[in-house]
Amino acid sequence: MTNNEVEPSATWPRTTWFACAVFAGVAVVGATYAALLLGSQFFADDFLYLQLGARDALTIPWLFEPSYGHLAPVFRLLHVLIAREGGVSWPFAAGVLAILVGLMYTAILWFARLLLGRGPAAIVVALVCASAIPTLRTTMWLASGVQVIGGAFCMTLCIAGFIAYLKSDKRWHLAVSVGALALGLLWQERPILTIGYLILIRYLFFTPERPWGWPRVRSEARIWAPYLVVDAAYLWYRLFVFESEPAPGNLGDGVTLFTSGFLRSYLPSLVGVRQSLDSDWVEPSTVLGAIVLLAAFLYVLATRRGAWRCVAFLVATYGANIVVQAAGRLGVPGTDPVWISRDLQYFVDPYLATVFALCLAWTLPRRETPLISARVSAIAMTVVAVPVALSTALHWVDVVKVNHQSYSHRYLNQALTDLAHTGNVDLISLKVPEAVSPPFVARFTDQERFFTIDADLRRQFRDASPRKVVITADGNLVPAHPVTLGWASPAATDAGPACISGPAGTELRLEVPSGARADEQVGFVRITYSSPAAVAVRITSGPGADNDWPVRLPAGEDRSVIQRLDHTPTDQLRITTLRRAENLCVSSVWLGMIAVDTIDGCRVIDHHGAPTATAARCDEEWGNLPTAVGAED
């Protein structure tokens, strides 16, 4: 047997094998979907990418804009699909993620089928990879799952197509492989490593029998030319056209990342364990993972000649993945290499590389006299496989119950449930809690801006509705009550309406009374106005202190719009038009806070909807507030 051939572990009838493979694939996709519904929700970057996808114009240049330094047109396109077709429906987004896991399963199944034959081993390998703890943990976060699982699918499809081409010499296999590489590079950066995987596979496991010479050079060039063209085009665009700033760290951080990741994430993941964030460097799962990894390669050594090739493949691919990870992230200010090393999204590819290395052992010649009997091998595999499967199942439950998205799961599900059971309301928009979306995406954490991605919710929110509500920090939809701190009056007149007309950039300046100005808890403004046409404005409460988004003032007489102020007002409040306005007349501008009923009584809330220690009266109603400057006197 040459190493271009594969010794099948077992051969099932084609129909039987296909039915079992489909059943296993449906099972893993269904389990993933259920896990996502039970334990996850939109989180962090999702708020940014979904709002961009919903509102920005879909153009080719937009797809190629940097996404936190990533070149990821396919990633951005999928967020457009989710935002415009699913709105804020997590079941829709979870369905997309589950489909990506299904695609990855299919690619791995093809890879394993090529190396292990049409038997149960290939199905088991695909099932193990698609249900691994790093895969599940990564999928729980939409942005991470779309990027990493999509990239892993493309890399695996590229590798499988390459092996199929080496075995069959069919050009369409090569076309699939090259196409998967191109797609992967448009998805995320990591598939640039795929060419290294292919080189190792070609010259360690599928070495040509023809001696070196001009015919062999031409044959090899025919294989590698399309890959080199794709990679060269990508690197040219990435280095000379695309605007990105890689942030490589120092050598010490790189060593910390490598060792911490290897001991705390990689080895435990091999035995189906996700370590807690406060775990030590070496835990029992670390030792067990090392034992299983060593035992697997000792088995290869005992049954195959040239086992060093599998070790070389794993060491090279694992090292390359860590280097890419370090080069792209470690230099970002505030980045902790230990924290990154605990993030399992960075260990999906090393996990797959380990499985690839072991599967590739089946291309190596079998020892004439194996150092271990088949019976002992079967017993050893069973002894290892059963505990690992049980551990994986237990940690699946753990990941679903406790993850970074757990708070978001409770918060958004509660808010969406309450919104689904209420009629038209005027939602006074707060910011989502930082546990749902951290400050680095602050411009995209406004509740209303996020929820109005969904067309049904957009129709439900009516600023003219007498029902003024807020979504609190625990996701509950509750009545909002005004707490008056002061009124802003036009700077140029003593009283009466202040009207402005003019192009974009026209300003109306309002004086803020000292009582309201000094109180750091000033958080909301109600503008009562009249305008013959809708106009967009921006509220500025101090130098560089703009609200993070435009405020839309619908057309009408004596309309009122309540908006959050993201900064404490100084001596002036400026309303600046963002497009031409005609006869926009402001009759009053109320400044104050919002109070809600809590178990501890009526309390003022902060910008995230969390109750503060400040007591208030919840018998105040918005309808009792004056609608004209001077009326409060």
Image: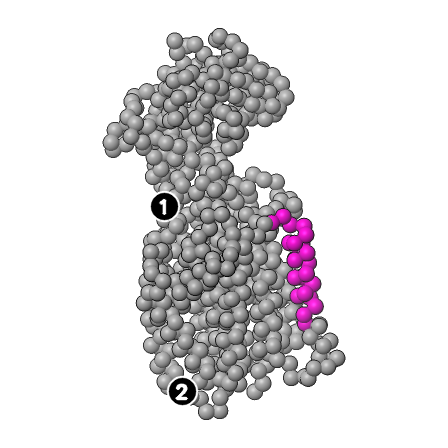
Q: Residue at x 45, y 75 (%)?
A: 121
Would you say residue 506 is visible in this rendering? yes
Percent of width and height locating residue 354: 47, 70
Would you say residue 108 is visible in this rendering? no
Between 536 and 612, the one lying in front of the other is 612
What's under tag 2, amino acid-wise? Ile
Mark 1, residue position: 407
Percent of width and height locating residue 90: 44, 47
Locate residue 332 relative to residue 137 in the image: left or right. Answer: right
Q: Quadrant of residue 379?
A: bottom left
Percent of width and height locating residue 530: 52, 16
Mark 2, residue position: 372
Q: In which quarter of the image is residue 269?
A: bottom left
Look at the image and give the residue range highlighted in magenta.
223-244
User: Would you say residue 233 sits in the magenta stretch?
Assistant: yes
Spatial separation of the CA atoms under disc 2 and disc 1 = 50 Å
What's under tag 1, amino acid-wise? Tyr
Q: Residue at x 47, y 14 (%)?
A: 489
Percent of width and height locating residue 107: 53, 66
Q: In which quarter of the image is residue 393?
A: bottom left
